[in-house]
Image (cartoon, helix red, strand yellow):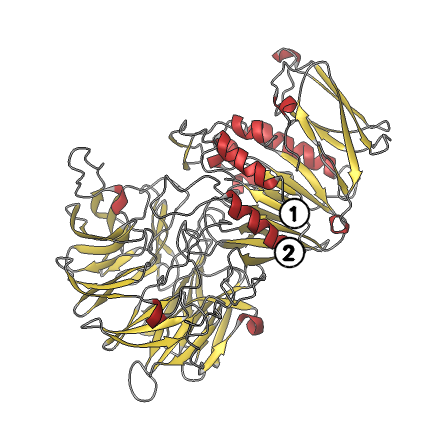
Amino acid sequence: MDTPTQHDREDDTPSDTVRGTVVDSLGQPLPRISVSDGLRVTLTDDNGAFSFNGDPDNGGALPGSGFITVTVPAGLTADRWFCRTRSGEDLRFVLERATDPAATALPYRFAHLTDLHIGGAAMYPQPAELGDAEVLGALLRRIAEQTDVASFMITGDLTDRGVDDQYRELLRTLSHSPRPWHTVPGNHDHMAGDRYHSTVSRTGYEIHTGDPAAYETWMGPRWYSFDLPGLHVVCMDWLTDELDLDAGIQRSWLAADLAAWNAGGQGERPWILLYHDQPTREFLGSAPYPPKATFSGHRHTDRIVKTDDVLHVNTPPAMFGGIDHSVAGYRVVEWDGEQITVVTGPSFPPAGSGGTVGSAGSAGSGRAAAEDTPAPVTPLWQHEPDTTGYRAVAAGQGTAGTLVAYRACEGGEGRLSCLDLATGRTVWELDLDTWPAADAPVRGSVDGSPVAVIGLVDGSVIAVDDTAGTLLWRFDSTDPMRRFSLHSPAVTEGTVIAGDVSDVVGISLDDGTLRWRRRDLANYQTFITMASPAPDGSRVAVGSFPAPERISVLDAATGGDLATAHAQQQSRTTGESPFSRAALPVATPVWAAPTGIIYTTLNGTSRLNPFTATVEWQRLSRRPWNEASPLCVPDGVVVTDSSGEVSLLDVDTGDTRWTWNWSRDSSGAPLVCRGTSRRTPEPLSATPALAGEEILVPTLCASVVVLDVSTGELRRVVPTCAPVTATPIPGPVGHGPGLLMVTVESDGGVRCYPLQ
């Protein structure tokens, strides 16, 4: 993509007519090339000429985007494909043959990156590592060296605050890109420093205002299109559409652009959409016909779903971990002329992993060649993605064996498998049309029969016979485009509580019918499901960072309010508050009877009485955004700090009973970063497990640390084949509890190890 020159940035008075030509490198006219003023689209005539008349009712101004853009056909390239509309100038665009054979070949491959946040970090909970121009440059070079992608497509939040210095850094890096690149704006690109404020959009989305001027100055048009071999690529501005600043113009342009793409009379030809956020049903319904796929970011999550035969790819940030603790990554997208396939590569592969593109969302094998990394214990059995085609994301204990939630390595399908704990053989498996949430299935019972409840990432919920794997019922998502259900639903007293804080539903465990629905607890928002509901008998606590700024206790059977704890603004004089926004959950809470809930906050752990809105105790952590939920054990509650600290706290007072600290000598070096807004690996991530009198602490050092639950004494370290990314599953086999454990690891494998 070319960078606008200073001449292009001049904001001259538009003419009542804009004319121009499109020619090849020899000056010969190019007919039937699509040209647009941001609203209307025309095809060049036999002389390569085009023109647009201004709107006489608007002083002769062109009614579009303020840019003239050329849709560059597949196999061609241009030093300049857009310019500002100016008076008294005949425009001339020169298209040349692409010298790279990959530009015209099928299959065509490109890398999808998103949410660079260049210049960010200072405004975030520390320590934070967001976008860095030098890191970006190295990443682009590595992708180009290790894959055969022909281009980079970057879907917004290129900068963190949309200021000149950040755009300047970005363009300095992109000017040395080893491949052509295309961008769309994100909401952060329109922040204009601090000149924005919170607002609620026409669709009920709690977002912020924006000014697109800086993006246009530095990057050019905010909506445009170009062609790949047999595929049309549409780029649009999500935020200004969501804010209704130019929704009508953008959508009218889209209709005209697709009409030009189909002008050859070949029917509805395929197209894809580059957009900062996941497009809504309403937006896609306004298009003349649906795309093959959409590519987005914004959520800082790893999510692929297929809805109405459209593949929706939401990619994690390119240079730091997501809020769902996905690793920094990018997608390699392949178009073969008929189908689109997607594979994900880690941006910062672990040492010893080879650094190549692997299964979607995986972080590579993760076993380093470093001398201080102990050799792994030989697994008793294992299932790996290269043999199954699926990567494991979570596991839990079922009636007939270990229940494992899998996601397809390519595409948006999933699978639920029951594996025999002793042998690893498949007892039963159920194919899913959507990825499961990255939490263990939740167990319940219907008429005395065991049931497993699984949440899907589009907000759907299914119930499965735990012994046979038979699908009992499915509750379809209330909005599969907008539900980003990252965590499992809750089950209590015959009710399944699911959804997100803006749309909570109570579902009958017996038959999957809707019992109640609450849409008044929060506006829709970007980080919509940081925590699952927390059940306790007939009540359930619902709340999540960053909004709503309250935690609600609902009647599980009816959805009615039992209590509401409203967050208060922090005092400017004392710095104290009984309950502040920073004390909202970032991981699923647990109840401490009768009135307390204990949960991980942005910067620590808190016990809250939601009936009085009083924080009864709090403990600060050394790292923000800890993934692990508290673990209740007989002598207290175990809390985890990703920096390497595990502590047992008194449930009532929060006093420390013991603390264990990670060391490289005893546990190995951290190999994978799952930290939100971080790229430096930390040793701990997932919630520990209780196995009799021992605590199993999963580490990102490719090991499980076994601690004495009463004293915190290190009993042993079990080296694993890769970093452990989910709670281990201890199992009683043969001689008593804790002799075996099943782990889910960063390469997507499931393995069983002896604990002794």
Q: Say which mark, if any, is on residue 684.
A: none
**Residue 637 placed where, x, y %?**
21, 64
The residue wearing badge 1 is 178
Q: Is residue 450 visible?
A: no
The quadrant of the image that shows the C terminus is bottom left
Give the class, few, some or many, for how many residues have Cα within 10 Å of label 1's Cα (few <14, many ≥20). some
Give the class, few, some or many, for how many residues have Cα within 10 Å of label 2's Cα (few <14, many ≥20). few
**Residue 101 placed where, x, y %?**
77, 51
Q: Say which mark, if any, is on residue 145.
A: 2
Q: CA distance from mark 1 to mark 2?
A: 9 Å
The quadrant of the image that shows the N terminus is top right
Relative to 216, does residue 495 appear above or below in the rendering? below
Position of 342 with respect to 418 (left or right) is: right
Relative to 413, does residue 105 appear above or below in the rendering? above
Amino acid bearing label 1: Pro
**Residue 630 placed where, x, y %?**
26, 61
**Residue 132 placed where, x, y %?**
48, 44
